[in-house]
Image (cartoon, rainbow, N blue to C red):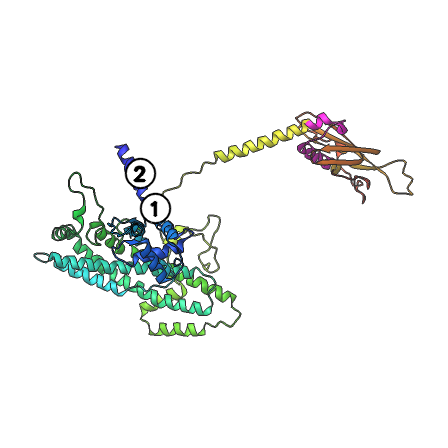
Amino acid sequence: MGASASGAGQDVGEGARRRLDAYTYLSARERLEHIAIMRVFCGTLLADLSVADIMAKLRQGGGPAAGLDADTLTVRLEQLVQWGNLLRSSHTVKASSISEYQRSRSRYQLSKLGERIQRDADGVLAEADAAREVSNELLALVERGLRELADLVTAPGGVEPQDGLERISTLFVQFTEFADSIRDFYAYLGQVLSRYDLDSAEYQGFKELLLDYVEAITEDVAFRAPRISAALDTLWPHIPALLDRLDAHAQGLTGLSAQGEGRPEVRVQRSRGRELVDWEGLRGWFRDTDGQGSQVDQLRDATLRALQSLLANAKRMLRSATGEMSRRKDLLRLARWFEEAAPQDAHDIAVAAFGLYGARHLGIPPATDEVVPAYTSWWTGPVVEVPVALRERGSRAQRGRASAVEDHSAQKERLREAARQRAAARTAAADELRSASGRFTDVRLTSAALGLLLELLATALGNAQLRRLADSDGEGPADFGLDSARSEDAELGIRLTVLRTAGVRTVLYSADGDLLLDDLELDISRIAAAVDGEGAFDGEGAVDGEGALDGEGVVDGEAEASVS
């Protein structure tokens, strides 16, 4: 059983891959030539064409494929056959000569999948960016057709099969056209409202579109949706028997399905309304049947989002306006709407224009550490955080499953490993410095060792205490010595002592270059890992109030660093 299920899944995946391959010609490098060839085949019905026939039609129509020779055209046709857009014809060739046979033996015809893809591609190329009008009048016809069909089905004797078949076909053609126009219009509307470069004229046009056209659509749908749902509720118990009666009257292509052994099964796509799943889709459009919301609810939500986007564009333009944009005309028109509207309509206009909804008592307590007197106005009172679910949906109920706690153990282990590596590198650098102490001219330090040494040197010079040398005569520049110029790292067990000796040059060779220190000597020693209560440095490590540095700093003017 598992093997058969796996084989069926592979067959489905292979079929989907073959169908997707038929779209390849639309993105190939020679796509303009392929489209011109496919349009030649779509212009005929059940016809097989030879290379010569196709070439003549291409030259007659002009376009990017008009200059193709026979060999190149044959390559293009064979590629379309490989992708599944064309089929090789089984037409018998009658020729009076060998040359005529060679020219006519390769004939091609259009596949069903290729015809559908090319038809959809032409529709996209011709009308993809156009604003499609909503066929709102079809919704009234759908309501009328459902009510009439429900009356006929529930009447004694039921509906005549042929009459029922005609009514159902008409009903679903009208509903499909209406639903497609709704989807296309709102897709165009979302594309327009996502723009932030609308000027005042464009904004005015789209505002009229939303306040008039979209409002008319939503009002009509909201008015007719309950009536259509009621008609479907009346008709629903009779639908299975009605479909069986229609199948007994007119089978259509269902006879092509497999009947008995040895006959291959042919997939048949039935007319809309001839299967129960079509009726379930119609019912789900107007009523929430699966807990995911109906299409009417989605239409209402999409309209609200469109109005919010429109208001966001209005705020943007008002903020960026320099005074030439006047809202007087719009406000006068709004005032006229309020004057002419009924009370309930006036409330709806106020909500659409200003987004001012009725007050709702949410009952959210303030923070426990805030005591708000009863006489405090909500205008000046503290702000209370409202949960997202309550703010957006008006409900405290949580949706969806609670997400599992994210496991950060892998990240923690990577961080611990990186910390261990850094600690090991610093320990190795400290060991290298201790072994190189006193013989810096004979070794070449690594980058890590030099970096640790510079870190210790900077700390030592910062902790140094200056003293004036006793032999300074006071007439020339003062000469200073260094006391307590040391630093240490207890974790690494290393101590650096810096001594100032006139005339001494200390050279540090490293992989990053050479560092020259004039009048300075470095001594590196080991210390115990634990630090006693008196601290790492003795009492001489502090700089008293008289230890101010002169303009030359700790290292005199002759100290320099050169990188080779």
Location of the C terminus by quadrant is top right
506 on left or right of 87 = right
In depth, the one of 22 and 408 nearer the eye is 22
Residue toward you, 205 or 255:
255
Question: For the residues carrying marks 2 and 1, which lies nearer the camera in this image?
Answer: 1
Residue 436 on the magenta span:
yes
**For the residue marked with disc 2, what is the amino acid?**
Gln
Crowd around label 2: few <14 · some 14–19 · many ≥20 (10 Å)? few
At which x and y percent is residue 415? 54, 34
Q: Sort mark 1 into few (<14), some (14-19) or many (20+) by Cα contacts within 10 Å.
A: some
Quick check: 298 above or below 554?
Answer: below
The image shows a total of numbered marks equal to: 2
Residue 313: quarter of image:
bottom left
| Residue at (19% x, 52% y) in the render | 274
> Camera-side residue: 180 or 13?
13
> What amino acid does circle 1 point to?
Gln
Q: Write the residue at 77% across / 36% down.
A: 516
Q: Which residue is mark 1?
A: 82
Horizontal and vertical percent position of residue 483: 80, 34
Residue furthest to the front: 97
Q: Which residues are magenta?
A: 432-460
The residue indicated by pointer 2 is 10
